[in-house]
Image: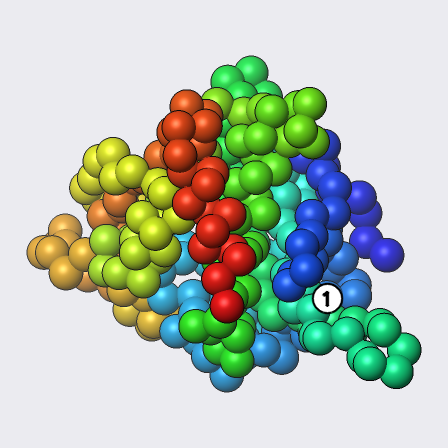
Amino acid sequence: MSSPPNFCFPVRELSNERIRLIPFDAILHTPSFFANTSAHPEIWAHMPMGPFTSVGDLQQNFVQVIQQDAKKTLYAVLKKSPPSQEEGEQEEELAGVIGYLNASFENLSTEIGYLITFPAFQRTHVTTNAVGLLLQYALDPEHMGGLGLRRVQWQTNVPNVASARTAERMGFMKEGLLRWDRVFADGERRGKVGNGKRLPDGKEKDLGRDTLIFGLCWDDWEDGVKGRVVALMARR
């Protein structure tokens, strides 16, 4: 087992009848994570990190970086199979990862990110349910088993249309655009998608990223977004 999560909020298992989110175990889960992503470097095209060349590279420069930061935590997304008629047991398969980042205990806020659904599980219920479970845990009040946070944020690279659509479908509101928000160091070689704008002289290989900001707050959640998310998670 790897070290327990070093996160500023309590980390617990989250589940429904379709998926289960458990704290990512670097030793147990990283080999499968790498096996499911190594042939798809485009998965990392909009993120500052990656792609990675080995299990060790992924573990050291992605998983451990997250797990050592009290503002971040990473979950393994396990897809449940239909229960066996003979034994009534459900098998589980690693379908991706998801996490919280930029969390603030003082401000009762966090962000959903590190959302990677493996290609075999894209366009299924996995992403909707993974995001939904993290929203429920973050925004439900404490007496309902949640953290009682006031704000959950979502950020995405402007060209990442799929991410923006997911955010809006899950009830997030677009709040703004941060121009030249990030630098993708050596981004051209690493397959990053930049903002397509003119770059400073001598820095043509370090692409720039413009970032869309979305927010979902506790009052939005209580005023109807929660019901919408629950309905999306239940769709067949």
**Residue 87 relative to residue 73: left or right:** right
**Residue 109 relative to residue 182: left or right:** right
Instruction: Give percent across and percent down for residue 217.
Output: 41, 28
Front one among 233 and 216: 233
Which residue is depicted at the point 43% across and 66% down? 44
Tell me: residue 215, above or below residue 22.
Answer: above
Tell me: residue 211, above or below residue 199.
Answer: above
* Res 206 seen here: no
The coloring applied to the image is: rainbow
Quadrant for residue 41, please give it: bottom left
Q: Quadrant of the N terminus?
A: bottom right
Q: Which residue is mark 1?
A: 29
**Residue 25 relative to residue 205: left or right:** right
Instruction: Give percent across and percent down for residue 78.
Output: 68, 65
Front one among 231 and 155: 231
Which residue is depicted at the point 72% across and 39% down? 11
* Res 133 seen here: yes
Quadrant for residue 205, please give it: bottom left
**Residue 10 relative to residue 164: left or right:** right
Instruction: Give percent across and percent down for residue 85.
Output: 82, 81
Which residue is depicted at the point 65% across and 68% down? 79
Q: Secondary structure at mark 1?
A: helix
Total marks placed: 1
Which residue is depicted at the point 90% across and 78% down? 87
Mark 1 closeness class: few <14, some 14–19, many ≥20 residues within 10 Å: some
Task: Identify residue type, mark 1.
Answer: His
Front one among 128 and 99: 128
